[in-house]
Amino acid sequence: MAQNEETRRIGFWLSVLQYSVTVLFSILAVSFWVLQVVDHAKFEEMAENNHQRTLALKAPRGIVFDRNKRVLVENRHSYSISIVREHTKDLNRTTRLLAAVLSVPEARVRDIVDRHRREPTYRPITVVQDATLAQVAAVMARRLDSELPDVVVEQVPARHYPTDAMAAHLFGYVGEASDAQVAEDRELKSGDIVGQSGIEKVYNRLLKGEDGARRVVVNSVGREIRTLEEEPPTEGQRIQLTIDYDLQKAVEDGFKISGYNGAAVVLDPKNGDVLAFTSLPGYDPNAFAGGIDRTTWASLNTDLLRPLQNRAIQGRYSPGSTFKMAVALAALEEGIITPDFKASCAGGADFYGRRFACWKKGGHGAIDLRHAIEQSCDVYFYTVGNMVGVDRINKWATNLGLGVKSGIDLPNEVQGLVPSTQWKRERMHEKWYAGETISVAIGQGQVSVTPVSMAVYMATLANGGTRVTPHLLKAIDNGEGWKEVPAPAPQSKVAINPEKLQAIRDGLWLVVNGIGTGGKARITTRDVSGKTGTAQVISNEGKAAAAGKTTRDLRDHGWFVFFAPRDSPRIAGVIFAEHSGHGSDAAASIAHHVLDTFFAREDGRPIPPPPVIVNPEAPKPPARPTTPDSPQDLKPAQVAARGPDEAAPGGAGAGRPGGAVAPGGAAAPGGAVRTGEAGTSGSGRAGGSRETSGVSDSGGAGGR
C-alpha cells in the first residue's frame, strides 16, 4: 500500500516536471523565433554596429538667388561635436568632461543628452552644431589622449546669410527640428536642421537636401579603422526668388538713413512678383544657423521693439488717408458720384449732431474728386463716405485687396479689417451707426490693414482691377537646369470703369507732382503716382493716460503708397515708417530712393546713393511744372495761385477719440495704443499736421 502511494507521488512529480520542461522549451522556442524573425533586422543592425558604424553625411541646403542670380543665402563649412554612446563606459563622466572642454554649462549638455536617450546608442548625439576652432582643437586633443574616445568631430554644412540682417523676415532662419516637427513629418529625424520661418520654412522640402552615409569599421574603443562604403549627400534644390537685391538694399538703406522702423513691400503690378520685402527692426538669421544661445533668444523675445514680428504681414495699422482711394472707387462704381462731383469744405462739417474737422482749418472750398485726393480733403471723403455707406465701402475695399489676406507665400500672415454692418453685428452684437462710417471714410475707426495688403491695393489700382497674389518663388533648379515657376493665379478680378479709375489715378499723380504732400517721392525720369497717409496712434486724452510711454511711442505712423510710371505702371508698393510722423516725410523719401533705383537700373544708369538725411522739418520741394500729359484741369496758374499755406504741411485739426484702445483691448503693433470705435467722444487735438483731422469738442470720429 505504501509502495503504491510512493509510486503515485513520484509519477505525479514526473508529470509536473514533464509539463514544465515542455512549457519551458515552448517559451524558449518562441523567444528564438522572436529573436530570429520578428526582431531580426533590429539585432542584425546592432550586430553590424558592434564592429561597423554608419555615419550620416549631412546634406547642404539649397542656395537661394535673387531674380538676377545674385546669391542671397548660401552654405559654409562648419564643425559639429557629438557623443556616440555605443562605446561610452561612463556617460556621466563623458558629459561632465565634454562640458568642461567646450566651456559650456554641464546642465546644457545633460539636457541635450537626455532628450536623445531613447534613440539607438550608435546614433551620435550632436552637442554643438557650430563649434569654434578652439572647441574642435580641444576635443581632438582629448581624443588623441583617449580621454574622449566616444566624442566625434564632423565637418557639416551650415547656413550662411551674407547680407546679415537684411531681409531677415523674408529669408527666415533654420534650426534643429523640434519633437513636434519630427512627429508630424516622417521624413525628419531628431537632429535634422529645418526651416523655422520665412522662405526657409515655406520651401523647406525644396531646400532640404538628402543626407548621405559613410559606413566605417571601428575598433573596440570606437576609433575608425577604414571606410567600407560611402554614399555622398545630395544638395537641396536651388531656388530663385522674385526679389531684386538692388531694390531690397535701396529699401533697407532708406530706412537705415531715416532712423525709423517699419515695413515695405514692392511688387510688379502685372504679376505679383515681390521685388522687395522688408520688416524692421530685424535680426541676424546667422545667429540661428549654429543653434541660438539662450541669452540671445531671450533678448529677441523681450525686446520692446519686437524684432521677431514680421510687420509686413503681421502688423495691423490704420491706413489713414491712403484709404481714400477705396472710398472714391466705391462711390464712382456704385454710381453715387461722378469724377466732377464737388463738396464744399469750410474746415469741417456736421454729421449726425457732431462736428468733424478737416486737416485744413480754413477749408478747401468747393473741391472735386481729383483735387480732393491731391489735397487729401477730409470733408470731401466724409461726405462721399456717408453717401456710399460702410457696406459698399467694405465691398470695394475688399475687391482692392484690403481686409483680406494677400496669399503671399510666407507663414503666419494675418488679415486686416474693413468693417461692415454684418461684422459689427456678429462680432459685437450691436448695430452699425451711420456716424461710424464717417471715420471709416478717411481710414480711421475700426479700419486696419497690413503693409502687404496695401501693396496689393496699389497694384490693383495700377493694373486696372486684377488683385494679384504676391509671391516670392520664381524658378527652381533640381540639378537639371532652371525651370520657371508659374505665377499664382490672381485672387480676383473686378471690372472697373477705366474713365472712373483714371480720375483716381489723376488725383494720385497730383499728390506727387502737384501741390499734394507726396513731392518727396518725385523723380525726374518718370511720372510717379502716390498717396501719403498719417495714422494717428493715440489721442491727447490717450497720451495723458499713457504713463511710461516714450515720445516715440506716441508719434504717428507715416504711409506712402505708390506706382510708376503713371500710364503703364511697372512697379507698385508701400512704405510704412513706424512712428515717423507724417507720411510725406520719411516714407515718401524712402519711396523716392526705391523708385530712383528701379528706373536707374532700367535706364542703365548708376544706382543712386541713398538719401543723405530725412528731416521732417525740411520745407516741401516746389511743385513740378505741368507737362502735356498732366490732368487737363490743373493749370500752371492754378498752382501759383493756391498759396504757400497749401503747399507745405501745416494747419490744425481736432483730436481723435481719446483713451480707447484697439478692438479687443490690445495695443496696436508698434507699441502704441490705437484709438477704438468711432463715435467715442473726445476733445480737440491742437497743432495737427498736414492731413490731420478729427472732432470738435462735441465729439465724433476722426482720422488722418
Image (spheres, grey):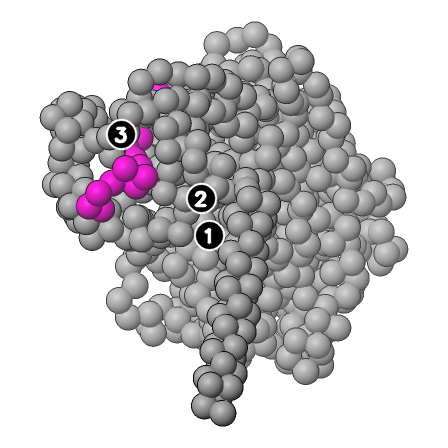
Q: Is residue 579 magenta?
A: no
Relative to 437, residue 82 above or below? above
Q: Residues within 10 Å of mark 1 (few under 14, many from 20)?
A: few
Judged from this view, the residue extending furthest toward the top is 604
Q: In the picture provided, is 438 more to the left or to the right than 40?
A: right
Does the rendering let one see residue 637? no
Q: Residue at x 77, y 44 (%)?
A: 491
> What residue sits 15% from the left and 45% below the top?
93
Q: Which label's residue is closer to the chain start, 2 or 3?
A: 2
The residue wearing badge 3 is: 220
Q: Secondary structure at mark 1?
A: helix
Q: Amino acid at mark 1?
A: Asp
Q: Which mark is residue 525?
A: none
- What residue do we see at 37% from left, 22% from top? 217
Quadrant housing residue 244: top right
Question: Gap between marks 1 and 3, in whole Å?
Answer: 33 Å
Q: Are marks 1 and 3 in contact (CB under 8 Å)?
A: no
> Is 87 positioned to the left or the right of 610 in the image?
left
Nearer the camera: disc 2 or disc 3? 3
611 shown above or below 18: above
Answer few, some or many: residues within 10 Å of disc 3's Cα (few below 14, many 20 plus, some between 14 and 19): few
Q: Are marks 1 and 2 in contact (CB under 8 Å)?
A: yes
Percent position (x, y) of residue 350?
64, 72
Secondary element at tag 3: loop
Residue indicated by mark 2: 190
* Mark 2 element type: loop
Q: Which residues are magenta?
A: 77-91
- Residue at the disc numbered 1: 179
